[in-house]
Image: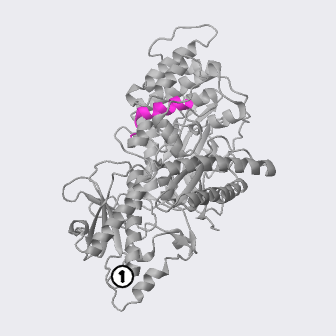
Amino acid sequence: MGTVHAGLDPQGVRVAVKVIHPAQAEDPEFRARFRREVTLSSRVVGPCLIPLLAADTETETPWLATEYAPGPTLNQHLATHGPLAGGSLYAFAAGTAQALAAIHQAGVVHRDVKPQNVILTPVGPRVLDFGIAHAADGTSVTRTGVMTGTPGWISPEHYRTGTAGPAGDMFAWGAIVAYAATGRLPFGTAAPDVVAYRVMSEAPDLAGLPQPLGELVEKALAKNPDERPSAHEAAERCTSLLSGQTTQVLPVPTGMEPTLVGGLIEAEWHMPTLDDPAWQIRRPSSRKRAVITAIVIGSVVGGVAGGALAFPSSHGSTDKSTTARSTMPASPGRTPSTDSNSSTTPAARTGAPTTPPRSVKDALASVPDPAYTRSEDETQPMPGEWAASTRAETSQETAAAQEIRDLARRMLATKGWEQSIPDVTFNREAQTVVVTAGPVPQIPEDHQDLFRRIGEMAACTVASRHLKEQPATWPYGRFSVYWLYGKQANDESVLGFGDAADGCSREIAGRWLGDDSGLATAGIPSSDKAEIRVADSTVKALQAAWDARAGEMSLPPLGAGTVKLGFDPVEHAMYVWADEDGYGPLGGRAQQSHLADVVAKTGCRKLLAEADTNGGWRYDRYVVALYWGNEGEKQILDSGSCPKG
């Protein structure tokens, strides 16, 4: 999302300056998220947090500056030095709980507590990243269509209902303390679907945690959020336990001042010596009056892995009566927008030709008077189109509606939504098949985006087949997907729309491409037993293949849980992804290329092997992606169809 600079002010105070890339600075949705991040960060102060020092969200190139915090992340420390113990472990638990207590007291929920977001500085742990935080009023800085949180650190209630409150942060706190103490993930390593099942149904692995800290962590990992301690309660208990680690045990009064707690943490905090040389102050030119002299130390996202495919998000209007809430673009549909230039596809950016199935348009051209006449019409659905649509009236419409419902239900069932049968209606004047869900007043946006994609694909698949087989009599080539928020007039909102004559799968130069929306869908846990089984075995196979290649080519090892896997039932694609901060095993182009090759070969082999024995198995595509840095910006490294035969 931007470049992080190390900087010094005239007094020599060290700071970290995040400068937003120009492309994102021009994006109104991104600016809103960045503005919200700054607002929330400015509200939160307390121990073991990294304070915001200054920011400008309205300038041409937005930026923010925070206190510089040297040190490795918890993940990096565990990989190099192993688990925390003794006073350092209790200091870690107390410090992170104090940080969450301060966050919650400010009316903010972090929503992404994980090892990559905790830095082990020389004076104690520091919790960072408010990139996906939200306020108590529910206002979110999360991008539409993206599941908040990271698998393994997501609470049971978040998986079930999308709820992400303070209790969810405490669940992640319990998991991260257990991880710090043992070096093991409390719910193991596996595909996201498998981990999600364990989080919701199985007890955590807490063997090796010292008591009574283990008892507190066990309470924090309770399946019922009401049974978990608050951050304030956990902080007080951990501070009391921390005091018992000192040479002279002193009583810790209730409500101990945060500054005193910070001193206690620092006293018991023992980290390896950090190689952190002093920075030199550059004297600014007399023509410059900048407060901070910045020294570029590395790009967080942009340009790190040149040549990889990156898919931009679209940004629609939020006028509910005529347009959709902002959603990721995904073939076959288009998300509505009041600005025809607001969404640019990769093909439009690069000039690469798209390749829709010729058979549909050839079929329309083969008859002198086709029933469908809007194949060149790219206008958005008009107000009133949904209300004017009617249920199937002809046998042709009845059969098509049933096909769409059945196809959508099969895809929805893989994510545990088998009861969510969409409504299918027809607007003959608009030549549009209409797919509707609801009425549901509130639902996580990643789930809403999943329904959009499934509705688009089901309608497009059926409509395109009818166009090809019955061009003279089938009038419905357009499709639109709506969400109902209530039962009153104008409670419908169009999520997406498209034209079946353009094809139902995105291709560029004949190659199928994955995208951000598919990645978000793959991150939603599966309830399909075959998918869970294949995901688990495939992750193990990918790990083994990487280990074998690492031994031959001196590649860095992939830590347990680095590679994650999920399925997108819409495009029949397996998504494999990993988190990377630029310093991990996948930070370089060569390593990324090796990962893409391992997935294309080993992953595809597993998919095709399942298809040989499972007649209902439809997955034959793959995508490899990275989530970069603390912001979790996504980058598609490779995608395609698995070669058969």
Left or right relative to 93: residue 31 = left
Q: Which residues are magenta?
A: 163-176
Q: Is residue 264 magenta?
A: no
- Asked if 337 appears above or below 18 in the picture, the reply is below
The reply to whether residue 44 is in sight is: no
> Foreground residue, 594 or 546?
546
**Residue 527 drawn at (x, y percent):** 45, 47
In the image, what residue occupies the spot 29% across and 75% down?
Answer: 396
Marks counted in the figure total 1
Q: Which residue is mark 1?
A: 470
Residue 214 sits in which quadrant?
Answer: top right
Residue 23 rendering spot, x and y as whole percentages: 53, 60
Q: x%, y% of residue 604?
A: 62, 59
The rendered magenta stretch, by its main secondary structure, is classed as: helix
Instruction: Tell me the quarter of the image containing the C terminus.
Output: bottom right
Q: Disc 1 on helix, strand or loop?
A: loop
Tell me what residue is drawn at x 59 percent, y 55 percent: 625
